[in-house]
Amino acid sequence: MTPPHWPAAVVIREVGLRDGLQSLARTLPTARKIEWIEGAHAAGLREIEVGSFVPPRLLPQLADTAELVAFAKTLPGLVVSVLVPNLKGAERAMDSGADGMLLPLSASRAHSLANLRKTPDEVLAEIEAMVQSRQARGSGIRIEVGLSTALGCTLQGRVDPEEVLRLLRAVLQLGVDRVGLADTVGYADPRQVMALFGRARAMAGDRLACGHFHDTRGLGLANLMAALHSGETRFDASLGGLGGCPHAPGASGNIATEDVAYLMASMAIATGIDMDRLIALRARLALWLEGECLHGSIARAGLPKTFHRPQSAESLNA
Amino acid sequence: MTPPHWPAAVVIREVGLRDGLQSLARTLPTARKIEWIEGAHAAGLREIEVGSFVPPRLLPQLADTAELVAFAKTLPGLVVSVLVPNLKGAERAMDSGADGMLLPLSASRAHSLANLRKTPDEVLAEIEAMVQSRQARGSGIRIEVGLSTALGCTLQGRVDPEEVLRLLRAVLQLGVDRVGLADTVGYADPRQVMALFGRARAMAGDRLACGHFHDTRGLGLANLMAALHSGETRFDASLGGLGGCPHAPGASGNIATEDVAYLMASMAIATGIDMDRLIALRARLALWLEGECLHGSIARAGLPKTFHRPQSAESLNA
């Protein structure tokens, strides 16, 4: 066998405040979200998706996104991103002062219609308008397109990789800064991940800069490892694996931030994360969200006695 | 990146009847164990570790092992193995008609003393006696040594890979048929697995024929993928992830058979397993063991609608 080349460091972006909280019926108070952002930053996370600029009547849980951006921007070195579904959301994101915005583009036509009431090509046109709006405003906000249902769809079933790559090429041509591939519904397998990320990287190079995996069927970390192997070094994750419960009772949502951080630490791949602080933060989240289903293994089992705590400058200064 | 070479098929050995049931305070009645073996065989599993020839006073849960071997040997094509801790156990295994016996050898001195009250070198001497006994009897039983705590130990902490390889070389020289490497306590990480399996394979060749992983810290399938990548094609697993609860409440034990089978099926790697039958068997196990903690994701989340059911001869004939 050829041993893989592992990177020296990876970036984990916390998306629980958006992908996690949007899946809950309850609304976490703004003060708690601020504690979460503060705690995540103190634990060494340096990228957080704090919310979404969708109409508050659709997702009242995320109605305080502008306030969260404003707070998060006060934390040193933190890259603050938000999800935006359309041009209006993009304009709010640019007004908010966020560093980056994530534009979802479903590779599944069925999912795209259900989620955004637009076909993928109509979403492409909206993305073009967003890129133009950024230019017209002279905004420096970073635009990332997240290709959702890129590895399968609960509505449509199989998603053709050729369609994923067609959409990928199209958004790259529109001039977005980054693209990511998302297994939105937990259908992916490692072989498929390696193949798709490999082809996407050949097309996008380092502009392919996010793997987003759900652990619905237990393959979340195996899929992440496959993406890591293919050269990906930036991953979304959600504290406590929050998200994904409502439509699949008992099933996990996003891969858990603390499990990804532990996996990376165990392989001596730097993330800047202080595991003890992150696990303590998860315990607080569990109290705030009493009754919700949190996931992940390392918080229950505890760190191994052989665990090596890196003395990173970030965790020392936090 | 270099895409890995995935094998066309892997073997999953069910070890829940031994590694799972020995961790429970209760004893599953023999009739239920027979249903389990029968159901596992009907679901396409072709290797089952049905029990252990340890003194019944130490593990009363496994006192019916000889009866289980006798039953399991009536099932066509089933490879029946048992764990044996010492020469006396090995003689009972040979008397039983089992196809193979697994001899555990802890790479951690502390674990070896706690588990078998012998140092690793004293266990080596016992293994030599077992090999000689087999020869003296003219028995055709297959001898496999499972190097436990090969990737870390809760008692001792770090386990030196040089010591693992020293013990591996010693048992190969004694003439055992197969060796396996076990992450008995769920301390391993994929990088470590790839390195150790790579070195062990260079020494043992195809006689390295088992990866045994626990999912205690969520890395079970990621570690299995690392071993698969390194060339391993035979894995232990336990239905419902049974095992490992008593000493780590809420934490998983062995990797779940159904999750490993799903992972392999998702990658189009043949196992001969019928997922629907296996998941149905797990549901029966959950009833038999009401109140015990079962693990695994695929049984809760369900198969994806895109899941491809291979029309294997074995599953059609079962």
Image: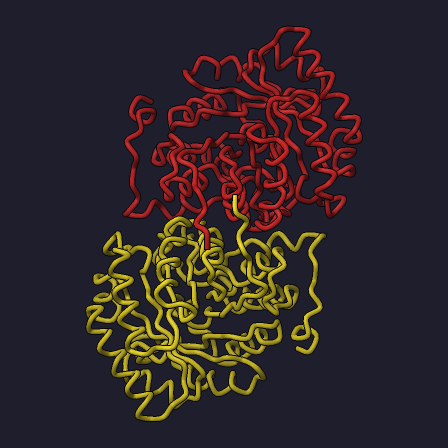
Chain colours: A yellow, B red
| Position of B265 relative to A77 (above/below) | above
In the picture, measured across the screen, residue B258 lies left or right of residue A240, that is left
Q: Quadrant of the C terminus of chain B?
A: top left
In-image side of A182 versus A154 (left or right): right
**Residue A293 in view:** no
Could you tell me which residue is drawn at 72 percent across and 52 percent down?
A: A305
* Nearest to the observer: residue B236 or residue A35: B236
Q: Residue at x 54, y 30 (%)?
A: B15
Question: How many marks overall?
Answer: 0
Reply above or below: A261 against A191. below
Above or below — where is B158 with respect to A311?
above
- Residue A10 at what x, y percent from top left? 54, 66
Q: Position of residue A179 (x, y in %)?
A: 37, 70
Describe residue B259's horizontal placement relative to residue A133 as left or right. right
Please state which of residues B245 and B84 is positioned toward the viewer in this rendering: B84
Asked whether residue B52 is in view, the answer is yes
Residue A295 image offset from top left, x and y in percent: 50, 57
Front position in the image: B234 or B61: B234
User: Splitting the image into 4 quarters, where does residue A307 fall?
Assistant: bottom right
Residue B124 lies, in percent from the top left, at: 75, 25
Residue at 57%, 37% in the rendered image:
B212
